[in-house]
Image (cartoon, rainbow, N blue to C red):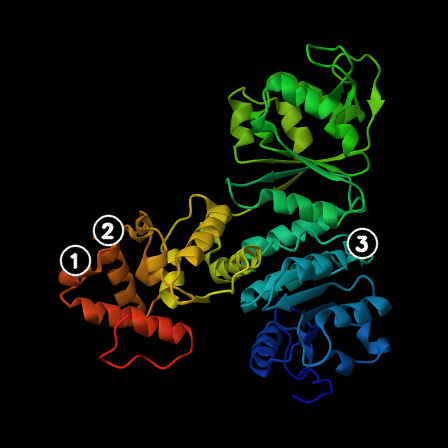
Amino acid sequence: MSDSVVTSEASRPARQGGEGLRILLAEDDDTLAELLARFLRHEGYQVDVVDRASALPPPARLGGYDAVLSDVHLAEGTGHDVMRAVHAVSPRTPVILVTGFADVEDAMSAVAGGAYDYLPKPVEPAQVKRMLADAIARRGLVASAGPAPQGKRSDAQIVGSAPAMVDVYKTVAQVARTRATVLIVGESGTGKELVARAIHARSERSARPFVAVNCAALPESLLESELFGHEKGSFTGASAQKRGLFEEASGGTLFLDEIGEISPKMQVQLLRVLQEGEIRRVGGSEPIAVDVRVVAATNRDLKADVAAGRFREDAYFRLQVVTVRVPPLRERKQDLEPLVRHFLALHAERLGRPVPHVAPSFLARLADYRFPGNVRELSHLTERAMLLAREGVLTAADLPAELAGEPAPGADTIAGDWPTLQVLERRYIDRVLAKMGGNKTHAADVLGIDRRTLNRIFARERAAALGLPPPAEGDDD
């Protein structure tokens, strides 16, 4: 594609939808650029295309676009460069960034830096059409945000580019710099505390403490003392005055995990703090002002608990000013491989071991599993597999036998991911081996092959994972 601007085909009649509105498309993938430009022109938009940040039109023209759609990674420069150039001359022009390499830092920087939205590839033309129409309709309400504050990056361990995770990143970016109370909901093991830490790290409180407490781990009397502190002599064993976690987190963030487990009495006390910004220590009479942002998390359905009378409605509404839903791992299976490699790198560093290679059968077995323990369970499974792996290669045989059970009800493992015949064969071998309790001789009998043939299948897989030629026919593992 040429460095110069490819001017829109003005001779084409405007159709209903775009109505002749002007779009700048920055994309260095010629095929995708042509597809999107043709689609948008068909919808009536006038489209100019560039393939790099240095090929942008001059400022006088740049401010005349109704919206900008840019890939994050261009042949030269980035979508962030495009966005800054556009907003320098027209702060209210909506800029939509698209990327094939979504990550938490880039997504949050994009939204906090003024992007109207941030989309992971692959993008559907119809999706782009809807988003452009919405962005242009709301253009008068869109303003460029300032640069994101630079704080400690405690969000580095959030991994994933599935659309549901990108939604999490965008919400974090939008809410981090506010004072709003945030409720993070999601199943156990999904990484709710990591999201809370990401909110803190991107906030103006990032230099102050982040204090976390598991509300379910403490009895009510002890939790009250931990949160609010106590005065000397306020109860048996209170031999000295103690500051509570609300005071310890002064100026920072207090993360209340498992908030759905606190008692009605504690709900009332928490509501008072949220409304009035002050606490009273146990046994004390004087109010103490606290400047703390509260981020809470739960794996319960608090709305149902409110309906059932188990959770106060006023406390619920005060907690969920903004709600962030962290998706379970079964809804973001495309993130399995990057998560596996992330955890392997962490465990290898901690254990002082080299990072092992990952065979296709290892990932295929995981793809069939529903992960009731979510990302936390995946971390444990990868650590176990790394400890049991032979020759530095993780295969399906290094996973617990129960993972090879029948697919979950309603799961269509063939239509769902369209595996190759070789992958299907390997999955079948894995399940037979699991049914036989890991006994290769018995598994080979059921499969109708001898044990040496089964061993050669495993040996070929390890060789492929290591980038080595397949073993000779006479070799065994």
Task: Please indicate whether residue 382 sits to the left or right of residue 430 in the image.
Answer: right
Q: Measuring from the top left, give residue 49's x and y in whole percent.
A: 68, 80
Residue nearer the viewer, 416 or 447:
447
Above or below — where is 181 with respect to 202? above
Q: Is residue 267 at least partly visible in the picture?
A: no
Above or below — where is 56 with respect to 94? below
**Looking at the rendering, which quadrant does residue 63 occupy?**
bottom right
Are the two marked residues, 1 and 3, in contact with CB atoms closer than 8 angstroms? no
Tell me which numbered mark, 2 or 3, is placed earlier along the sequence: 3
Alpha carbon separation for disc pair 2 and 1: 9 Å
Q: Measuring from the top left, give residue 419's x and y in whole percent.
A: 34, 67
Task: Please report the residue visible at 34 percent of the width from the left and 51 percent of the height from the top.
Answer: 400
Q: Which mark is residue 149?
A: 3
Q: Quadrant of the N terminus?
A: bottom right
Task: Please indicate whether residue 43 sits to the left or right of residue 358 in the image.
Answer: right
How crowded is the residue under tag 1: few (<14 C-alpha within 10 Å), some, or many (20+)?
A: some
Q: Nearer the viewer, mark 2 or mark 3?
A: 2
**Looking at the rendering, which quadrant does residue 432 occupy?**
bottom left
How crowded is the residue under tag 3: few (<14 C-alpha within 10 Å), some, or many (20+)?
A: some
